[in-house]
Amino acid sequence: MPPVRNAIAIPFAAGCLGIALFSVMDAVMKHLVLEIGTYNALAWRNGAGALIAGAFFLGTRNRWPGKAIMRIHITRGLVATVMAVLFFWGLGRVPMAQAIALAFIAPLIALFLAAILLGEKIERRAIGASLLGLAGVVVIFVGQAEADLGPEALAGSIAILCSAVLYAYNIILMRRQAQVANPVEVAFFMSGITALVLALAAPVLGEVPALEHWPLILLGAVLAFGSLVLLAWAYARAEAQHLAPVEYTSFIWAALLGWFIFAEPVGWFTLAGAVLIVIACLIAASRRVPDPVTQAETGIPGG
C-alpha cells in the first residue's frame, strides 16, 4: 500500500541523513582524539552539545520530563557515555571503515539481549545469522593480522566490539526514548547526561583545548545534535526493524572519509567481513517479531 511505504520512506530518509551526519562527526572526532585525546575530545564536544541542545530545549519551552521518562534518559545517557568512550578510543587506533564494520555486529547482539531482557525466544535463523556475523568479525581480525597493524589496533578493535555490545542495548533504549520524548529533548539529555558523567573525571583528565581545536569541537557538537534530532524523529515514526538498514550506510561514509581525510585504504578482508555481517543482520531482521518497544513492561532496566 503506497501510504504505508511513504510513511516509512520519510523516516528512513531522515535516518540516512542522521547517519551521514554521525559519520562526518566520527571523522571530526577521530581527528580530535588523535590531537587532544579521547577524554577531552568527548568531554568538550558533549559539553558544547549540551549548551546547543539546551538552548533549543529551553527556547521551545519543553516541559521537564517526569520520573519514568527521566529514568530512560539517564539510563541511555550512562550507557552512551561508556559506549562512546570505548568506540572513540578504538577509533583512534583502527581505520574508520574497519571500526564501523565491527560495530555492525550490534544488531545481532541485540537479538540475544532481547532474549535476556524481553524473554524473546531465539530462533534457529537468529543463531545461524549470529554465526555468520561472527565469521565476518573473524575475517576482519584476520585481515588486521595480515596487515600487521600492531597491538594498538588489536586493542582498539576489542574496545569497539565492547562498544557494540552497549550499542545493542542502546538500540532498544533509543526506540523507547524516541516514543516518550521529542527529538530536542532526546538530544539535550543525551549530551547533558554524558557531559555531566564525563565531568566527574575532569580534575584528573581534563585540559582546556588550544584555540585551534575549538572549531572542530563546535562542529562535532553541531553534527551530533543534528544527528540525534534526526534519528530520534525517525525512530519515533518507524519501528527499529525498518530503520536498522540505515546503519549500514555508515560503512560507505566511513570508507570515503577514512580514505579522503586519513588516507586509510579499505582492505579486502574488511570489505568481506562487513558484507558477511550485513548479510547476517539482514537474515536476522527478516524474522517477524513484535517491536521490542511494545513490550515496555518486560523488565528493561530504567523503564
Image: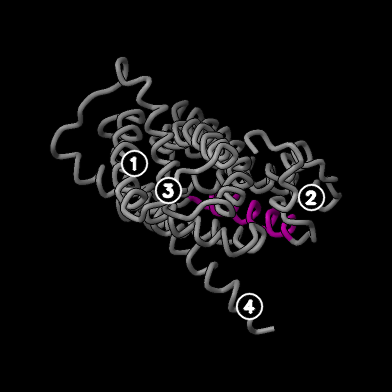
Q: How many labels does the image show?
A: 4
From the viewer's perspective, is 207 left or right of 14?
Answer: left
Instruction: Answer with mark 1 or mark 2, whichever residue precedes in sequence.
Output: 1
Q: What element carries label 4?
A: helix
Residue 283 counted in the magenta span: yes
Residue at position x 49%, y 57% in the image: 231
Q: Which residue occupies the foreground of this view, 203 or 293?
A: 293
The answer to whether 189 appears left or right of 33 in the picture is: right
Q: What numbered label is drawn on residue 50?
A: 1
Residue beneath label 2, please? 126
The numbered dot on residue 187 is 3
Task: Point out which mark residue 5 bears.
Answer: 4
**The C terminus lies in quadrant:** top right
Mark 1 or 4, which is nearer the eye? 1
Q: Would residue 141 be visible to someone looking at this image? A: no
Q: What stretch is highlighted in magenta?
A: 267-285
> Which is more N-terminal, label 2 or label 3?
2
Instruction: Please tell me whether residue 278 is drawn above or below residue 218 in the rendered image.
Output: below
Q: Residue at x 31, y 36 (%)?
A: 47
Q: Which residue lies furthest to the bottom in this view?
A: 2
Measured in 3D between alpha carbons, the distance from the residue under mark 4 to the one under mark 2, in whole angstroms, is 26 Å
| Spot occupied by residue 221 in the image (x, y as percentages of width and height) | 31, 46
Q: In which quarter of the image is residue 92?
A: top left
Position of the N terminus, as image quadrant, is: bottom right
Amino acid type of disc 3?
Ala
